[in-house]
Amino acid sequence: MSSLSERKARLIVHGDRPYNAEPPLDRLRTAYRTPAPDFYVRSHGDLPALDRDTWRLTVDGDVGTAMELSLRGLRSRFREVTVTATMQCAGNRRADMRAVAPVSGDPWDGGAIGTADWTGVRLGDVLREAGAGEGADRHVAFESHDGVAGHPYGVSIPLAKALAPETLLAYAMNGEALLPEHGFPVRAVVPGFAGVRSPKWLRRITVQDRPSDNPIQAGDYKLYPSDVTPETADPVRGHTIDAMPLNAAICEPARGASLKAGANRVRGYAIAGDRAVVRVDVSGDGGRNWAQAALEHEPDAPFAWTFWTAGLDLPPGEHELAVRAWDSAGQTQPALPDDTWNHKGYLCACWHRVRVSVV
């Protein structure tokens, strides 16, 4: 296995402590399943060093029987399943909003996203074994080994999503044990939700009658109107980000590329949460005219992205390529980052634009 420093060298690193990095966009299109060394990394604190033999997971709260599980116990007591799903940071494509006005957070391009085969056990199986009662007013809170500003990382999801068959406690990614930066030995995988709701390095799961009061859940990852500032933001009034919006990005060619006149291939990804991407439009002139892309998707992976490829006949000159996707609800993307700008730079889902030169 390559070292962490070698894997860092493959990525665009936005920060070292905490470690945050994304792959170049063209590398996302080399494989439908993103190799672990090319998968984006989002951390909130230092990477914890955990031992598979001494690691334990506590399951408690509003359950019939509290449990403490080792990795071996987790794997032996519950049926192993694999789910192909896309993980995406809520700040993916923040750089486009940053071009409109200042925003907080790392300047992610479109690479804070990736798709993998996640292998583990269903969180719902574990919760049912513990005797968790179902109810619309119940939440499942996660606590992790990494620390943020003196407290452990913690978030929560509604119990209904925790019991959904796609939600996992995962210990493998693309058939290999999780890398340290991706949550070794066990992480949550909550398909369709923002990556923040899939915490890594798990140590505790609690069923309770309210969302987590951890600052990451209670105070961060909130969507605000454009007129709200860091000084006026009230987390109680912000919308908690769970499900992710329809989005698409151009992975090839890169911004500033020099292309030959004539037929050119444009490739990228689109994602619509648990809905299907039914159409992708690609433009060579900033959105005045559109061509239809060919779509590539796995029907047994409803929470995974769609790859798309389009051919454009480009004459010499400067061109603004653009892409927009449509989902099964007939929804598409806003044209400009100005339309959904917010001071945190979350959920940028406007048309992705790439300027190129054609000679």
Image (cartoon, rainbow, N blue to C red):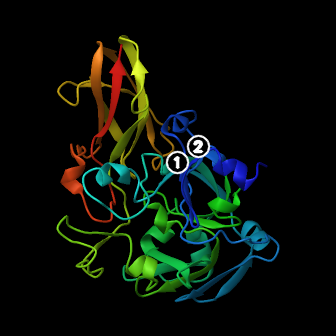
Residue located 63% across and 71% down the image: 46
Picture mark count: 2
User: Please, what secondary structure does the residue beneath circle 2 have?
Assistant: loop
Disc 2 marks a residue whose amino acid type is Thr
Using the rendered image of the protein, determine whether residue 290 is visible from the camera's viewpoint.
Answer: yes
Q: Nearer the viewer, residue 320 or 153?
A: 320
Q: Residue furthest top?
A: 262
Disc 1 marks a residue whose amino acid type is Gly
Q: Which residue in the structure is indicated by mark 2?
A: 34
Which quadrant would residue 354 be assigned to in this image? top left
Rendered location of residue 296, percent (x, y): 46, 31
Residue 143 horizontal side relative to residue 283, left or right: right
Residue 65 horizontal side relative to residue 69, left or right: left
Residue located 38% across and 66% down the image: 242
Residue 342 horizontal side relative to residue 85, left or right: left
Q: Nearer the viewer, residue 231 or 271?
A: 231
What's the distance in space between the residues labelled 2 and 1, CA to CA?
6 Å
Q: Which residue in the structure is indicated by mark 1?
A: 114
Vertical position of residue 53 compared to residue 63: above or below:
above
User: Please, what secondary structure does the residue beneath circle 1 have?
Assistant: strand
Residue located 52% across and 51% down the image: 85
Q: Residue furthest right?
A: 53
Residue 327 horizontal side relative to residue 13, left or right: left
Rendered location of residue 33, percent (x, y): 58, 41
Q: Who comes first in sequence, dot 2 or dot 1?
A: 2
Q: Quadrant of the C terminus?
A: top left
Q: Are marks 2 and 1 in contact (CB under 8 Å)?
A: yes
